[in-house]
Amino acid sequence: MTPPTIPLMTIGAFAQATRLSVKALRLYDDLELLPPERVDTQTGYRWYAPAQLEPARLIALLRQLDMPLTVIRTVLDAPSAARPTLIRGYWDGAEQQHGTRRALTRYVLNTLEGDATMTQTFTVHTREVPARRVATIKQRIFQPELDSFLPASMTRLTEHVRRQGAAFADAPFVIYHGAVTADSDGPVEVCMPYSGSLSPQGDITHREEAAHHEAYVTATKAQFVFPTILEAFDATAAYADAHGTRGPLSCREVYPYDWNSAGPDDPAGEVAWPFIPSPT
C-alpha cells in the first residue's frame, strides 16, 4: 500500500501560518537553520512540510527575545527536553547584561549631572608604597576578555615565582595603562611582587616598580562588579587631583585578600591611584 502523500505548503502559505516574512524564511534557508522540505530545481520555489510549523514558530518567538541565530541553532539542534534549560540560560545571561547596562546608564547620568554621592560610597586612604621587583604579564585585551585574562595570568605568575624558588613580597596587582572597554584594549599588566632571584620566561618579564604615594579604597566583591567599580576609580582619582598631581604611574587594582573565599559583602580588593602629593 502506498503511504499517503503529505501536502506541502508554498513559502507564502508557510509565511502566513508562521507569521515569519518570506525574506526571513529565505535567510533561514540560506543559513540552513530552517531549510524547506523541497526546492523545485526548475523554478526555485520553496515548499515546506506541516511538521516544520512548530520549529518555525519557535524561531519566531526566540527572535523576539533578541536571541542570536547561532544560539537558536543550538536550541533547535538540542533534544526537546533540553531546550527549556538552554532558553533559561540564555535569558539569565540577557537579564544580567540588561542589569549591567542599567547600572552603567545610571553611572553615566550621575557623572553628567555631577552627582557627588558617587564618590562618597568609598572611604579614601593613602599610603607610601616602596620600590619593589615585580614579575609581570602585559597584554592588550578588550573588556570581554578581562575576566579570563586576569585569573589565568595570576595563576601563571604564582607558578612562575614558586617554580624558581623566589618569595612573594606583597599582594599581586593589576595596572591599567589605558582604558579597557569593548573598543579600547588597554594594555593591562598583571604584576606579582617578589624577592629573590627570577629568570624571565616567555611573555613573563621582570622589572622594578618605582616607590610612590597612592590613594586607595577597599571594595567588596559585589562592588568589584562593572560598572560599580568605576566609582572606586573615580573616588581615588578625585582624591589624587584634590591633594596633588597624578603621577606617571597608572591606576591599578590590588588583591591583598583571598578572592575565591570572599563573599559578596567581604573585602575582595583595593583600587589605587598613584599621585604626587602637594607640598604641605
Image (cartoon, rainbow, N blue to C red):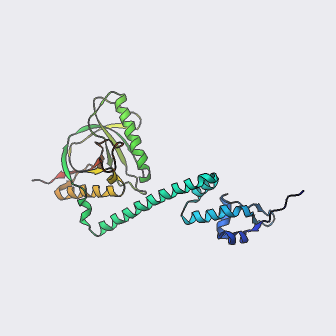
Residue beneath the point at 27% across and 58% down: 234
Q: Position of residue 32 (x, y in %)?
A: 67, 57
Residue beneath the point at 33% across and 30% down: 198
Nearest the eye: 2 or 99:
2
The image shows residue 229, relative to residue 66, as above or below, that is above
Q: Is residue 49 left or right of residue 171?
A: right
Nearest the eye: 106 or 206:
106
Nearest the eye: 44 or 202:
44
Q: Position of residue 223 (x, y in %)?
A: 32, 54
Q: Position of residue 247 (x, y in %)?
A: 23, 51
Instruction: Determine the image quadrant of residue 180.
Output: bottom left
Assign the N terminus to one quadrant of the image. bottom right
Q: Position of residue 140 (x, y in %)?
A: 40, 48
Residue beneath the point at 44% across and 52% down: 144
Q: Is residue 240 left or right of residue 266?
A: left
The image shows residue 73, relative to residue 175, as above or below, that is below
Q: Is residue 200 visible?
A: no
